[in-house]
């Protein structure tokens, strides 16, 4: 079982608040569980603290998971793929024209090597 840090949205009435949790995945990389509480930054050294903070910062670039729907939203690989596709499209829509051209060129090269 693998894990990483992810932002989870908590609903309180009509309001949402966010915290970083450890999320655990099955063999198909589908989220299956998460820590009950948001995680703290701690470690045995400054290097450990730095590593944890870096991993926490990485999760800010990933789609936010909703506790309200967890894990039902991710019950199938197709649903997870659709969420990833939507996230990717959202990110592409924020790119400049030059960045899109570069992305297209790199993707074409990648696909041609398969």
Image: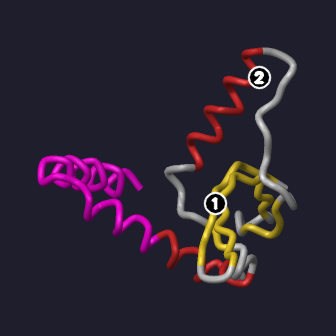
Q: Position of residue 54 (x, y in %)?
A: 61, 32
**Mark 1 residue element:** strand
Image quadrant holding the N terminus, namely bottom right
| First in sequence: mark 2 vs mark 1 | 1
Q: Is residue 97 left or right of residue 17?
A: left
Give the residues in magenta: 85-114
On the question of residue 76 being in view, the answer is: no
* Residue ID at (71%, 32%): 52
Residue closest to the eye, 70 or 15: 15
Residue located 26% across and 59% down the image: 94
Q: Quadrant of residue 108?
A: bottom left
Up-down relation of residue 51 to residue 107 (above or below): above
From this viewpoint, is residue 102 visible?
yes
Q: Nearer the viewer, mark 2 or mark 1?
A: 1
Q: Quadrant of residue 40?
A: top right
Q: Residue at x 65, y 32 (%)?
A: 53
Query: Which residue is labeled 2 in the image?
Result: 48
Magenta segment: does it hold 105?
Answer: yes
Q: Is residue 95 magenta?
A: yes
- 77, 61: nearer the viewer: 61
User: What residue is pinned by disc 1?
Assistant: 18
Classed neighbour count for the residue bearing mark 1: other residues with Cα under 10 Å, few (<14), some (14–19), many (≥20): some
């Amino acid at each position: 079982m693998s894990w990483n840090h992810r932002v989870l949205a908590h609903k309180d009435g009509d309001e949402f608040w966010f915290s970083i949790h450890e999320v655990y995945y099955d063999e198909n990389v589908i989220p299956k569980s998460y820590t009950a509480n948001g995680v703290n930054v701690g470690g045995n050294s400054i290097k450990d603290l730095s590593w944890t903070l870096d991993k926490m910062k990485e999760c800010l670039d990933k789609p936010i998971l909703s506790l309200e729907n967890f894990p039902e939203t991710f019950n199938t690989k197709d649903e997870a793929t659709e969420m990833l596709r939507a996230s990717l499209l959202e990110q592409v829509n924020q790119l400049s024209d030059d960045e899109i051209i570069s992305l297209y060129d790199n993707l074409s090269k990648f696909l041609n090597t398969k």
